[in-house]
Image (cartoon, rainbow, N blue to C red):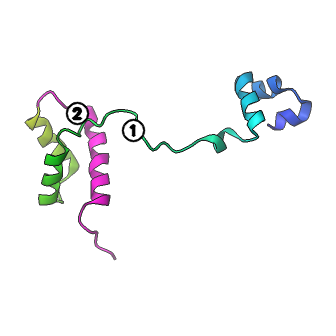
Amino acid sequence: MEEMTKHGKIGRASMMSGMDRKTGRKYFKSGQFPSQTRRERDYRTREDPFDRDWPLIRSKLKEAPALESKALFEWLMEQNPGRYEPGQVRTFQRRVKQWRALEGPNQEIF
């Protein structure tokens, strides 16, 4: 709040920094910048769409850990027509990546 030290007006300092007057007042009272008040989220914002089929997917990954996640997703779409959409492939890839990091086979160290 550099602007606040120039003229001492919260409303003007907030406007110059591009935020609402009430928001500026909140940060001024707390003595912290907005970047310092953010906390990491440790909860899910929506239900995982792959929870229902994840035990089957996990067994497939344990049998053949070299399977590509996109191929596994296409197989999953064939097994469950209408349940998954092609736009969910990235979510599935993230889930498989997380499984490989936590439960997958050990990686070769160079």
Q: Is residue 52 left or right of residue 18?
A: left
First in sequence: mark 1 vs mark 2: 1
Query: Separation of disc 1 and disc 2 at Cα?
Result: 22 Å
Does dot 2 land on a helix, a strand or a loop?
helix
Residue 61 is situated, as x and y percent measured from the top left of the image, at 17, 55
Q: Is residue 97 left or right of residue 44?
A: left
Which amino acid type is shown beneath numbered disc 1? Arg
Query: Would you call the spot at circle 1 few (<14 residues within 10 Å), some (14-19), or many (20 or more)?
Result: few
Q: Is residue 88 left or right of residue 39?
A: left
Does dot 1 land on a helix, a strand or a loop?
loop
Look at the image and tell me whether residue 105 can be seen. yes
Residue 41 is situated, as x and y percent measured from the top left of the image, at 48, 42
User: Quadrant location of residue 44?
Assistant: top left
User: Quadrant location of residue 84?
Assistant: top left
Can residue 7 be found in the magenta stretch? no
Which amino acid type is shown beneath numbered disc 2? Pro
From the image, tell me which residue sits under label 1.
44
Residue located at (26% from left, 43% from top): 92
Q: From the image, which quarter does the N terminus lie in?
A: top right
Q: From the image, which quarter does the C terminus lie in?
A: bottom left
Residue located at (18% from left, 59% from top): 66
Query: Would you call the spot at circle 2 few (<14 residues within 10 Å), some (14-19), or many (20 or more)?
Result: few
From the image, tell me which residue sits under label 2.
86
Look at the picture and state if 97 lies above or below 107: above
Can residue 108 be found in the magenta stretch? yes
Residue located at (72% from left, 30% from top): 26
The single residue placed furthest to the bottom in the displayed view is 110
Residue 97 is situated, as x and y percent measured from the top left of the image, at 30, 53
Q: Which residues are magenta?
A: 81-110
Q: Nearer the viewer, residue 53 or 19?
A: 53
Look at the picture and state if 3 lies above or below 102: above
* Of labels 1 and 2, the one closer to you: 1
